[in-house]
Amino acid sequence: MPTQIAVITGAGAGIGRAAARALGRAGFDIALLGRNEDRLKETAENLAKHSVRSLVIPLDVSDAKAVQDAAERIETELGPISVWANCAGATVVGQVAALSADDIRRATEVTYLGSVNGTLAALGVMRRRGQGAIINLDLAPNLRGMPLQAAENGARSALRGFCESLRPELLHDADNIRVVMVDLPAINTPHYGWTRNLTGKRLKPVGPVYEPEVAAEAICRAAFSTSRSISIGATNSFAALWHMVAPGCREARMAEKGYKAQMEHDWAEGEQPDDLYKSVPGSFGAQGPFDEHSRRLDSPLTFFVSSSLRAGIFGALTAMGLTALMAHIRNCRKS
């Protein structure tokens, strides 16, 4: 049986690098896409130690033609693409009133259009065989609507809507191509140190923090899942319910706690390089600086919830609530 081929964008560091290792262990050969060629080569060297073939293609995912050309090259040099994971992203953190239109445009080009470009390139080659899996990253419900994060929230919301429209089109055309969203909580990656930051203070993750290997495991599960989405931990499901039932209360809490939750006490030391327009030089791995507080794969609080399982749980809870309500009404009538 020939080896399956997976493509990962943003594979030089953070979630992308961890996902490359996870999919390599699952038996895939990996195409590594990203802006920083040196870090992509480091990832490739790590994969080679575990007998995983790889192909390094430096590019900017906002360049649609470069991504399309990469897909054709991968098909020729590695083989038919069966999984494409869009892990690349860039953003700017700050109040909307302080953001520039150029920075918002660039964040959208990388995070939203970069994932769209990857999805289109994957569709172009997967439709030749009528099968495959496309994985896109989304924010977990507890991170959606976070103040100071309008650029990324806007890009991820657009991507979510794009995928929701794409799925019925694939069903209509009878293509067995799955589009899976991975809803990620805060992940301990280097991006907190290289994100364009207008707050003046150092950034930190919000809520439960997980190691990149947890995100990589979710991506690996998405490659074989029939669900629309996969989330991590219980917080996401409760946050989604809270957002639906009491959006006003959630917004008030975000206004009160959201700023402080994202920033360290210390002020940032001068202007720090960021990756919004150009890749930050240097050697970075998958992990960031928050190891002491992050949950690992073996943590009892680390578990994965698919959209089908979540729907079943919500359905069961709703049925239980309706049953209790009907029983209460009958008792009231009897008395």
Image: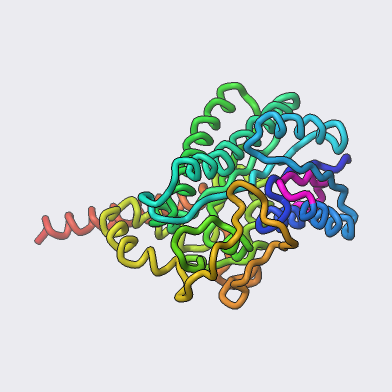
**Closer to us: 279 or 320:** 279
Q: Residue at x 66, y 34 (%)?
A: 63
Q: Residue at x 74, y 38 (%)?
A: 82
What's drawn in magenta, residue-wise? Answer: 23-37
Above or below: residue 266 compared with residue 177:
below
Residue 241 colored in magenta in the image:
no
View extreme (bottom): residue: 292
View extreme (left): residue: 335
Which image quarter holds the C terminus?
Answer: bottom left
Total tally of numbered discs in the picture: 0
Residue 29 colored in magenta in the image:
yes
Residue 54 horizontal/vertical position (percent):
84, 47
**Closer to us: 211 or 228:** 211
Residue 225 horizontal/vertical position (percent):
63, 46
Q: Residue at x 62, y 74 (%)?
A: 291
Q: Is residue 87 left or right of residue 27?
A: left
Regarding residue 305, the answer to whether it shows in the image is no
Residue 110 horizontal/vertical position (percent):
59, 42
Quadrant position of residue 167: top right
Above or below: residue 42 compared with residue 77:
below
View extreme (front): residue: 270
Which image quarter holds the N terminus?
Answer: top right
Q: Residue at x 60, y 21 (%)?
A: 173
Q: How is the image coloured?
A: rainbow
Q: Is residue 285 left or right of residue 173?
A: right
Quadrant position of residue 18: bottom right
View extreme (top): residue: 173
Residue 27 horizontal/vertical position (percent):
82, 50
Regarding residue 63, the answer to whether it shows in the image is yes
